[in-house]
Image: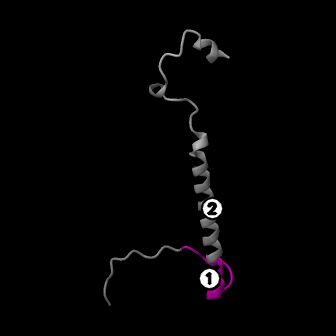
Amino acid sequence: MEATNEAPTPVVLRVVHGRPTAEELAVVTAVLLARAAAAADARTATVLSLISRSDQAGWRRLERAGGFEGPRSWQRAAA
């Protein structure tokens, strides 16, 4: 027998009561993985909606502003 340096495989599912068949374990595993994937997709969609373009600041960059607008431009800005 050869000695291996592999770590033991972590337990992902544990049956507490009963003796499920391999098919039943496969179904439970598929359902849990589908739910986990759906939750991850929902989190991704939430993050993407938080950083969407409509949520960006509504101010403009001053270096892109036009030049002198005239002596009464403050009245137009205040209206």
Residue 26, numbered circle: 1
Q: Whole-percent x and y of residue 23?
A: 64, 87
- Compared to residue 45, the image places residue 70 above or below, namely above
Please indicate whether residue 5 sits to the left or right of residue 76 in the image. left
Range of residues picked out in magenta: 12-29
Disc 1 marks a residue whose amino acid type is: Ala
Q: If you read the primary sequence from the N terminus, does the residue marked by circle 1 or circle 2 appear first?
A: 1
Determine the image quadrant of residue 75. top right
Q: Whole-percent x and y of residue 20?
A: 66, 85
Q: Nearer the viewer, residue 11 or 16?
A: 11
Residue 39, numbered circle: 2
Question: Helix, strand, or loop for circle 1?
Answer: helix
Determine the image quadrant of residue 12. bottom right
Q: Nearer the viewer, residue 78 or 32?
A: 78
Please indicate whether residue 2 sits to the left or right of residue 21 in the image. left
Question: Which residue is painted at 33% across and 81% down in the image?
Answer: 4
Outermost front residue: 70
Q: Whole-percent x and y of residue 60?
A: 53, 29
Q: Nearer the viewer, residue 68 or 54?
A: 68
Question: Which residue is painted at 52% across and 74% down in the image?
Answer: 11
